[in-house]
Amino acid sequence: MDYREFKITCSEDFREILIAELSEIGFDAFLETEEGFDCYSPLEGFDQVAFEEIIDRYREPAQIEFKESLTQKVNWNEEWEKNYDPIAVDDLVYVRASFHPPKGGFRYEIVINPKMSFGTGHHATTFQMLQLQGQIDHQGKRVLDVGSGTGILAIMAHLLGAESVEAFDIDDWCVDNGNENFQLNQVPAQMGLGTIRDVNPQGPYDIILANINKNVLLDELEIYAQLMKPDAFLLLSGFYSEDIPDLVDHCKGLNLELIQQSTHDNWAALVFTKK
């Protein structure tokens, strides 16, 4: 089968958004690069109008440039494996793919085969969320992972001793991939599909994890607060350092108190507790 190949250059903060948008219109393989990402769509059924609409919408804010060509079908897994390295989050957890060998010296190990899903630990937001999780007592707790992606944060919660873990995502590909990763890590859970309003999780929870983006967080924070037990923890990431004041101000009105924050490469993560 022939494919359309697009080598897209874009600003880093729009890369995941663009991948998500393109996956909705028939693109079925993505390779992240230093400048952006390469993406592939089967030649048959390619939706030129939808593609141009996405590019036009994000061209200026994401500083998009791209080159288009035709290519034969390739071994996507082989290409992906060349570009995926394991990571270490301090001595807390070693995150690797199934084709990487285990490595000692860590309290925990997570096996993630991300395919097209988001959340491998490589991004600064996921890395910080894992770090912060390691500082919170999960033993016997009830945990909700909002916008779970690969399921990596839910898996971390399970390893840290959570009694129950619930997770969901709006992308059906992420749900399939997340459930595969749950099986790889022996997590007794099934990821749901939809927004938090669609899934309608039933609280209260001891810990809520949300690594999404600022606009979604601001829209859903009131729901998170309603689902939290007194003294529960809310861990947020997916936004920039300059967005911290907006999120903190919004949380104040919901009786949520900031107790910890971190930044890495201008990406931020916050921990709140419910008064």
Image (cartoon, rainbow, N blue to C red):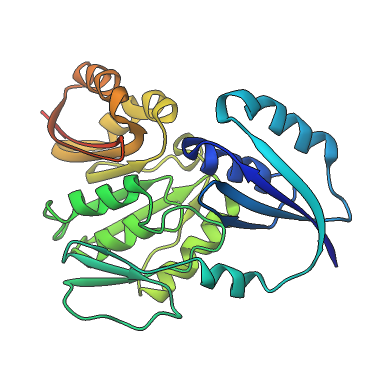
> Where 212 sits versus 87, above or below?
above
Q: Which residue is pictured at 31% across the width and 40% down the height?
A: 265
Q: Is residue 58 above or below residue 80?
A: above
* 234 with respect to 49 (left or right): left
- Marks counted in the figure total 0
Residue sticking out furthest to the bottom? 101
Place of residue 108 in the rendered image (x, y in percent of width and height, measured from the top left): 22, 71
- Nearest the eye: 255 or 114: 114
**Residue at image location 59% in from the left, 50% down from the top:** 37
x%, y% of residue 95?
33, 68
Q: At 35% across and 57% down in the image, what residue appears? A: 121
Nearer to the camera, 177 or 164 = 177
* Left or right: 172 in relation to 39: left
Q: If the image is split into quadrants, where does the C terminus sit?
A: top left
Q: Is residue 250 above or below residue 114?
A: above
Image: 142 above or below 255: below
Residue 140: image quadrant is bottom left
Q: 144 or 96: which is nearer to us?
A: 96
Q: Is residue 38 left or right of residue 191?
A: right
Q: Residue at x 40, y 52 (%)?
A: 167
* Image location (x, y in percent) of residue 230: 13, 35
Q: Position of residue 186 (x, y in %)?
A: 35, 75
Q: Quadrant of residue 272?
A: top left
